[in-house]
Structure formats: C-alpha cells, structure tokens
Image: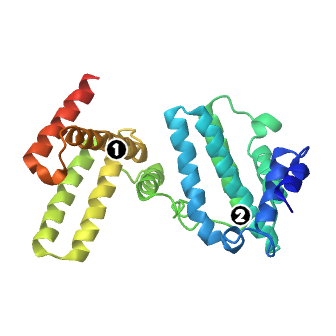
Amino acid sequence: MTRQKQQEKTEGQTGIQALIDVMARLRDPETGCPWDKVQTFATIAPYTIEEAYEVADAIRLGDMKGLREELGDLLLQVVYHARMAEEAGLFAFDDVARDITAKMISRHPHVFGEGQAQTPQDVNVLWANLKTKEKTANGKVKDSILDDVPLALPAIMRAQKLQKRAAKVRFEWEKATDVLTKLEEEIAELRQAIGSKDAKSIHEEVGDMLFCVVNFGRMLDVDCEQSLRDTNDKFTRRFNGIEKELKEKNKDFSDVTLDELEAIWQAQKLKENKN
C-alpha cells in the first residue's frame, strides 16, 4: 500500500483506529517495516518504560506540547504490544480497552454504583479492598504483602514501595532519626568491607546503605526517586557550567587541576543559589 493510499484509508477513521491500522501495516510479514516486524514483547518493553519516563518528564517540566507528543509515543507502545498479542492469537487492542474500562467501573462503585467515598483517603481504602477481593476471586491470593510490588520498578522506587508495605504492618522504625543511627551502622560495615577488599561484601553493603537512605527519605515524606532525579538534573546543570567556563577560556579538563575544577564547581553552586 502506498503512502497516499494509507493516508486515504486513515481519513475519516478515529485516531486510535488509524494508529491500529498503521501498526498492523508496519508488522505485515510481507510488506511491513524490516525493523518493526521482527520485534518481540521483550525487545519493545524497554521502549515502553522509556516512553513512560518521558511522559513524566514532560509533566515535570510543564511542557504541554511535549506531553501531547510523549503521550502519543506511550500510546504507540500499548498498540504495539496489543498488535503482537493479536498476531499470537492472545488478545487485541479492543480487549485491552474493554478490560480496563470494566475495571475502572468496578473499582469506582462510589461513582458508578452505590458505594460511598467522600475523600481521597476513602477512595484509597475502597480501591485496596476491591483489589484484594478481585485477586482472591481470581485465585491470586498473596503469600506475602510484598508479592505485588513490581520487580520491574526502578530500584529506588521499588525499595520505597517495599518499605511502605512493611510499614503498614508496623515493621517500621519509631522515628526517622532512628534510621540515621542505622545508616551510620551500615557505613561502618561498608568501611569494614572495603578494608577487607571483599568485592561481594562491598556490593552488599552499598546496597544496604542505599536502602537505608531511601527508608530515611520515605519517613520524611520525600519521594526518593524524584529527589535523585532532581539531584541528577542539578549535577548536570553545574557540570555543564564547568564545561561552558572551560570552553570560554579555551581550556579542556586536562588543562586544569582537580582543585581548579572544584573551585569552578563551587562558583557554579554560588551562582545558582543567587538565582
């Protein structure tokens, strides 16, 4: 099918149907795109995660034009996976849409039924109870309250969710400052591991220290994933400032000492704090 014929076909269709048809065309075994038609669920999954993060970044930046584009990219991922599932005879996009529609209705009896919920907190309790009932009905009874914390989450986000779940059954420090004491203990254990040059122990102790830091942040109501993202952005800005200053002086990193780099770094911090 030529580009013109494809455009003619999609005219008058809903946006989603046009996208579904385009994906089917890309995946056509005979005439599809050489790259698209050989992809699998596993090879596309990393792109799905990446697109979700780009949606979050557009929201964080307040970039509504970018958000429109990134939501389209994320929607493409759903259509992509649904198309591959349809080819395998598993399910199609319409099945995905119908299932989530039914779930939203069943999970909101306070909107679509006779349930009662006056506050967001009421809704959270109602939602959790309904999820538990659904999983019990489907034979998905959890052996542990940690079972449904997704393994695919970024490590910091997953650590925070694991800790939050444990806290629900009072497996929790009494106060945030208690975690600082634990952190000092973990740092001492890391120093000992470094001293013994035990690579396995160093690996484990670094993980324990990070887990402890996340726990401390969580107890202070800090979103540790976002906190680290913001710090990454801050580091990038300041490092870019160093690069810019060196470029203005016709210098490279090899032309300056570590002390000189530290001085430029501190100047960048001061400049940023004044703004």
Residues at discs 2 and 1 in contact (Cβ within 8 Å): no
Its colouring scheme is rainbow
- What residue lies at 56% left-to-right and 57% top-to-bottom? 49
Q: Vertically, is 221 above or below 31?
A: above
- What residue lies at 79% left-to-right and 53% top-to-bottom? 19
Q: Vertically, is 29 above or below 103?
A: below
Kind of element beneath mark 1: helix
Residue toward you, 235 or 34: 34
Q: Quadrant of residue 159?
A: bottom left
Residue toward you, 144 or 231: 231
Q: Vertically, is 135 above or below 266?
A: below
Q: Quadrant of residue 194?
A: bottom left
Where does label 1 land, which residue?
Answer: 217
Kind of element beneath mark 2: helix
Of the numbered discs 2 and 1, the one sitting upstream in the chain is: 2
Mark on residue 140? Answer: none
Where does label 2 land, which residue?
Answer: 81
Residue toward you, 259 or 164: 259
- What residue lies at 65% left-to-right and 51% top-to-bottom? 74
Q: Is residue 123 visible?
A: yes
198 lies left or right of 216: left
Could you tell me residue 224's position as x and y percent?
39, 46
Could you tell me residue 112's position as x and y percent?
82, 37
What residue type is disc 2 on?
Answer: His
Could you tell me residue 12's position as x and y percent?
91, 43
Q: Vertically, is 99 above or below 36?
A: above
Q: Nearer the viewer, mark 2 or mark 1?
A: 2
Q: In which quadrant of the rendered image does the N terminus lie?
A: bottom right
